[in-house]
Amino acid sequence: MTPSHYRSFRYAFWPMWRAQLSLCMAGIGTVLVAKSAWTGQPIQRPDLLLHVAMGLLMALVMCGPVHAFRFRVGPQGLHTFDARGRWQTLPWAHVRAVEPAYLLHFPHLRIRLDGERRSFWLPLMLADLEGLHQAVVDAAGAEHPLARALPRPARASFRC
């Protein structure tokens, strides 16, 4: 890996969309049922079409962040964000601890640095988690706390 070479990783679209769609549909469904109970009228077809349209709109809204927010791994460190959404490159040598955590109900790794009170976050719903693990091993080594904390998908084994 050359000093200027970084590998980029983006969010996986489908897990993000499913979670957002579930929340959106539950909210709209609750409003429709409450409106129907309040007015005494059954749920109408336009209301159901609104339900479907909001799901499709949520897919369009999710496309932007999924493609815009990329996490980079390179020789200098990991480019990720803190709890306030500020992006920063974390030098490999300054990573003190990495632990699994949830941020907004999504699985992440919480990264703590030497001399920093704030935590940084790396989502685990990335499109190429195996590639991220390999990039971290290539850039920081297999014994780095982040390389050890990243989950690796189970591989099928051959049985006789």
Image (spheres, grey):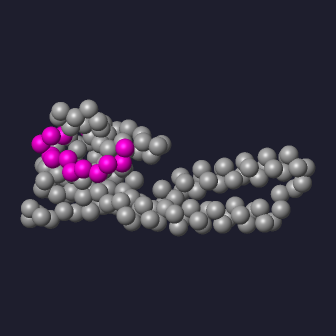
- Image point (73%, 66%), residue name: 49
Measured as percent of width and height from the top left, residue 12 is found at: 41, 60
Lateral position of residue 104 relative to residue 144, left or right: right
| Residue 28 vertical placement versus 3 (above, below) | above
Residue 97 seen from this side? no
Image quadrant for the N terminus? bottom left
The extreme right residue here reads 40
> Which SS type dominates the magenta stretch?
strand
Nearest the viewer among 43 and 18 is 43
Image quadrant for the C terminus? bottom left
Measured as percent of width and height from the top left, residue 58 is found at: 56, 62
Magenta range: 84-98
- Image point (42%, 42%), residue name: 103
- Image point (36%, 57%), residue name: 126
Measured as percent of width and height from the top left, residue 115 is found at: 18, 33
Residue 103 seen from this side? yes
129 part of magenta stretch: no
| Residue 22 vertical placement versus 50 (above, below) | above
| Tally of numbered tags | 0
- Image point (45%, 46%), residue name: 106
Nearest the viewer among 140 and 83 is 83
Measured as percent of width and height from the top left, residue 85 is found at: 36, 48
Lateral position of residue 89 relative to residue 39, left or right: left
Lateral position of residue 39 relative to residue 105, left or right: right
